[in-house]
Amino acid sequence: MHFKTKNEWCFRFFNSPDYLDIYQDMTGPLRTEAEIAFCQNVLHWRPGQLILDAPCGAGRHSIYLSKQGHAVVGLDFSSYLLQKAGASLPSFLRKKSPPDFVRGLLQNLPFGDETFDFIICLFSSFGYGEKEIDNLQIMKEFARLLRPNGKVLIDVMNRHFIAPRLSPVYESSCSDLFVREERTITDNGRRLHNLIQVRDSRGEKRQYLYNPWLFDGDELSQLGEQAGLTIEKIYGNFYADEYSRSSERAMMAAVKR
Ligand SMILES: C[S@@+](CC[C@H](N)C(=O)[O-])C[C@H]1O[C@@H](n2cnc3c(N)ncnc32)[C@H](O)[C@@H]1O
């Protein structure tokens, strides 16, 4: 599968086991549960309604929702993470109604118009396009896929919160990895440039560029409106507090009228 708009460096990171190792502390069951509880709280979905989890990564939200009895499709571009998602399905779910995992690109989603009641895009998964214009294209795709009165929730880090707290160099270790990150913010505060260098216990070195576009609540709202969505509210955290410039996150709930 080849797409012009694919951000090759970023995709290399998400296609490697290193991504899951590095983010394991931030993607555990407690956080997943809190994220889904928040979505339920603001989206009010009901059993039988169809949810798209895009991008789904290794499927933690899709699987959680399926266990609750929801009909879910998880989409991601990373074949490695999708394979992990399939492999981590509990056997009772495999026999019942597992999520449908689909490989695809957010810029060109492989579904018909008005297919989904809800779309969730969680854990800073919006903004990985090569070009800034990709962000609007992805938002338009979300709008296209929603049924009338369907809702989307997009959760990203708030760039005003991140910028002053970002250490230029951050070193950590996890699993058998030593990780060194060199971070700067580029494009007038609108993009993160994080060079991630990894050394494993055998001394092997790997290097990735993680460079998502960054947003604040207003920029997210503008994109939603440009895509024809009606913004319901911008939240600032998983406790459903209203967004402000100092909020940790920017989370847009929008509806298709
Ligand atoms: C930070 S991970 C989060 C995954 C998941 N939402 C979660 O919370 O675990 C971001 C994911 O976005 C996927 N991704 C990024 N850009 C994409 C695109 N344009 N199309 C499809 N998947 C994309 C990556 O493969 C990766 O799995």
Image: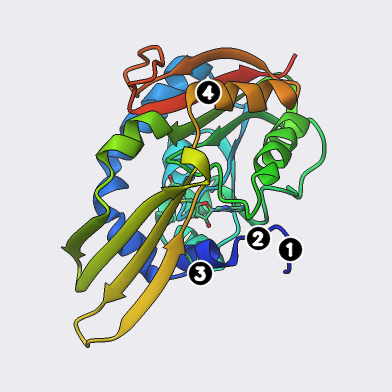
Kindly tell me whether mark 3's CB lies below 8 Å from ligand 1: no
Instruction: Judge: label 2 CB < 8 Å from ligand 1.
Output: yes
- Pinpoint residue 175: horizontal percent, then vertical percent: 20, 68
Q: Nearer the viewer, residue 184 or 208?
A: 184
In this view, 103 is above or below 97:
below
Q: Which labelled disc corresponds to residue 3?
A: 1
First along the sequence among labels 1 and 4: 1
Circle 1: residue type: Phe
Label 1, label 4: how many angstroms apart (C-alpha)?
Answer: 27 Å
- Helix, strand or loop at label 3? It is helix
Cα distance in 3D space between marks 1 and 3: 14 Å
Give the residue displayed 43% in from the left and 18% down from the top: 235
Q: Are marks 4 and 2 in contact (CB under 8 Å)?
A: no
| Residue position marked by numbered label 4 in the rendering | 252
Q: Nearer the viewer, residue 147 or 220?
A: 220
**Residue shown at 65% from the left, 41% from the top:** 135
In the rendered image, which residue does mark 3 sit on? 12
Q: Residue at x 53, y 31 (%)?
A: 154
Q: Is mark 4 within 8 Å of ligand 1?
A: no
Could you tell me the amino acid type at mark 4? Met
Q: Callout 4: few (<14), some (14-19), or many (20+) C-alpha neighbours within 10 Å?
A: many
Would residue 17 be found to the left or right of residue 168 on screen? right
Under circle 2, the secondary element is loop
- Is the C-beta separation of discs 2 and 1 under 8 Å? yes
Left or right? Give the position of 44 relative to 100.
Answer: left
Which residue is disc 2 drawn over? 6
Q: Earlier in the sequence, mark 3 or mark 4?
A: 3
Residue 93, given in percent of the width and then of the height, sits at 46, 49
Amino acid type, callout 2:
Lys
